[in-house]
Amino acid sequence: MPTDSPADSTVAAERRADLERRLAAVNERIAGATRAAALDRSPELIVVTKYFPAADVRALHELGIRQVGENRDQEAGAKAAELADLDLAWHFIGQLQGNKAKSVVRYATAVHSLDRPSLVTALGKAMRRENELREQAGRGQRAPLATLIQVDLRDEAQRAGNDGGVGRGGAAPADVQQLADLVAEADGLELAGVMAVAPLGADPAPAFERLAAIAADLRANHPGATWISAGMSHDLEQAIAAGATHLRVGSDVLGPRPPVL
């Protein structure tokens, strides 16, 4: 069985040290923002590992990370299979096509990007099929899929001009309650809360405050929908101040993206 060369081992050790340093800096930022907001506990950190190798995810696991996020189903599924020996929760945070639902439910603990009724239908159908297959194989049913409604936080003028949201997805705030009701009634889905990305080029603080208000309205009808997934490398402090429960941080932990071949 091949073993790593001394050079490979040195590179791996250097990469782990770099990840450890970066992760410590992000955790310090989170702790500082939590103190500034006078919160009892820090939000959960989801490290977004898209484009980075499974070896980085394994190193992050050694450093205490248990929540990882991915944007692309093919990449996420391959990593989840390679790292099946680790106790990781996989969060799908990218825009999701309905025809990928069957694949995503095989590995994902949560989907953060539900933004339309047809996707509720696709995920519910995929969950029913996944549990049927597990039953046929003599395996237990999987846990319900934590499902977050992605909210488009742009104002009406920005949405009309598609300003600051190209390719980002998200339901209009007025549609959140209807989507929530559909999720709550769907087989195998568990309404977890809301997710959003702050509009590009705008102050994220007011956007995240709007998201917090939307989340509060949602909890009035669905008390279990407590997640607020908001905040990335550049705006996690503003997200924490607005009450985010889950942060999605990639580049500040992992560094610049490797070239995509």
Image (cartoon, grey):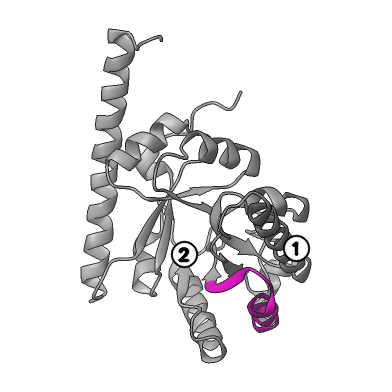
**In terms of secondary structure, where does tag 1 sit?**
helix
Range of magenta residues: 176-193
| Residue 224: mark | none
**In terms of secondary structure, where does tag 2 sit?**
loop
**In the image, residue 2 lies at what x, y percent?**
40, 9
| Residue 125: mark | 1
Q: Amino acid at mark 2?
A: Ala
**In the image, residue 68 lies at what x, y percent?**
44, 49
Q: Earlier in the sequence, mark 2 or mark 1?
A: 1
Residue 37 part of the magenta-drawn span: no
Quadrant for the C terminus in the image: top right
Mark 1, other Cα within 10 Å: few <14 / some 14–19 / many ≥20: some
Relative height, residue 254 to residue 173 (above, below) = above
Identify the residue position indicated by label 2 in the image. 230
Residue 30 in view in this figure: yes
**In the image, residue 150 lies at what x, y percent?**
61, 67
Mark 2, other Cα within 10 Å: few <14 / some 14–19 / many ≥20: many
Q: Quadrant of residue 221?
A: bottom right
**In the image, residue 246 lies at what x, y percent?**
41, 64
Q: Quadrant of residue 34?
A: bottom left
Residue 181 part of the magenta-drawn span: yes
Judge from the rendering whether residue 48 lies leftward or rightward of residue 161; answer left or right: left
Q: Amino acid at mark 1?
A: Lys
Judge from the rendering whether residue 84 lies leftward or rightward of residue 111; answer left or right: left
**Front label number (2 vs 1):** 1
| Label 2 with label 1: CB-CB less than 8 Å | no
